Amino acid sequence: MKQINPDNTKDIGKRELVEAMFDSIAYRYDFLNHLLSLGIDRYWRKVAIKMFSGRKIDNLLDIATGTGDFAIEATKIKDAKIIGIDISEKMLLIGREKVQKKGLANRIELKYGDSEDLKFESNYFDAITVAFGVRNFDDFQRGLLEMHRVLKTNGLVVIIEFSKPTGFPFKQVYNFYFKNILPIIGKIISKDKSAYIYLPESVKNFPDGQDFIQILSEAGFNNCKIKSLTFGVASIYSGEKK
């Protein structure tokens, strides 16, 4: 498979590259996700879903749902119906199997969908979630504007993304792991080195922290906040539609 570089997509669009990449690693994605994050990704999702506490949520959209982990965690929101979308059909197939096995088919629907061209009417969802997907958008602003469009007034968007730790010595350990260890483990288990070269590159190029808060605000979201997770390895971003 062609090595993926988010800054070098002249021959083929970033969207097509990301779709092909996730299709290629789908069968080992869950295992690698939990292994490479030491299982902390599960905790991050739990923290993010708790941000919806006290809100009445009938319909929730999980963008870049992958194999459905965030959508499944969202079923802890009482009575919420969840639609998860992704551009990787192979990831979705695995996600649907997980949903069926957990007996959640009456709560969760996973289907093909492009985050930058949402096939939903405006003001439809009470809440939107994205876990580790925004950095894969071809156009951040377009994707966020689409999210704002389909969200109801007073609705909440919650986004988890990797960040870049700044404190010594965690910053140095983290950078070494991401650049040197993660690609090797990823290649051995998934047989696709390019996917785990892409991951640290995409994190490096993502406008995290206050830069992303500014982008959220420019897309029309209000009361934008950031919550740092695990020494700054990841962050939860939130914003409301007013």
Image (tube, rainbow, N blue to C red):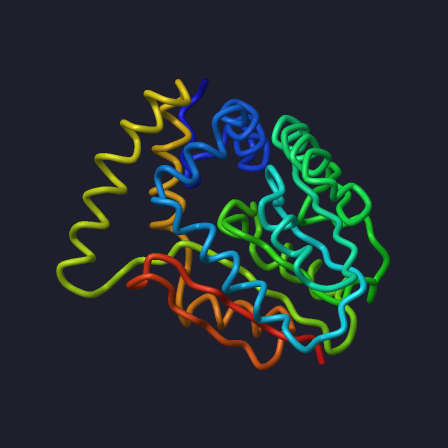
Number of callouts in the render? 0
Position of residue 20 in the picture relative to residue 44 (left or right): right
Q: Quadrant of residue 178?
A: top left
Q: In which quarter of the image is residue 153?
A: bottom right
Position of residue 89 in the picture relative to residue 179 (left or right): right
Pick the front one: 240 or 55: 55
- Residue displayed at 52% across by 56% down: 45
Q: Where is residue 210 in the image (x, y as percent from the top left)?
A: 41, 72
Quick one: quadrant of the N terminus? Answer: top left
Pick the front one: 96 or 152: 96
Return the residue found at the far left.
169
Quick one: quadrant of the C terminus? Answer: bottom right
Position of residue 34 in the picture relative to residue 68 (left or right): left
- Residue displayed at 23% across by 50% down: 174
Q: Where is residue 225 in the image (x, y as percent from the top left)?
A: 50, 76
Q: Quadrant of residue 33?
A: top left
Q: Where is residue 131 in the image (x, y as percent from the top left)?
A: 54, 52
Return the residue found at the far right.
121
Pick the front one: 220 or 125: 125
- Residue 19 in the image: above or below residue 116: above
- Residue displayed at 82% across by 45% down: 106
- Residue displayed at 40% across by 35% down: 5
- Residue 111 in the image: above or below residue 212: above
Position of residue 179 in the picture relative to residue 140 (left or right): left
Q: Where is residue 9 in the image (x, y as percent from the top left)?
A: 48, 34
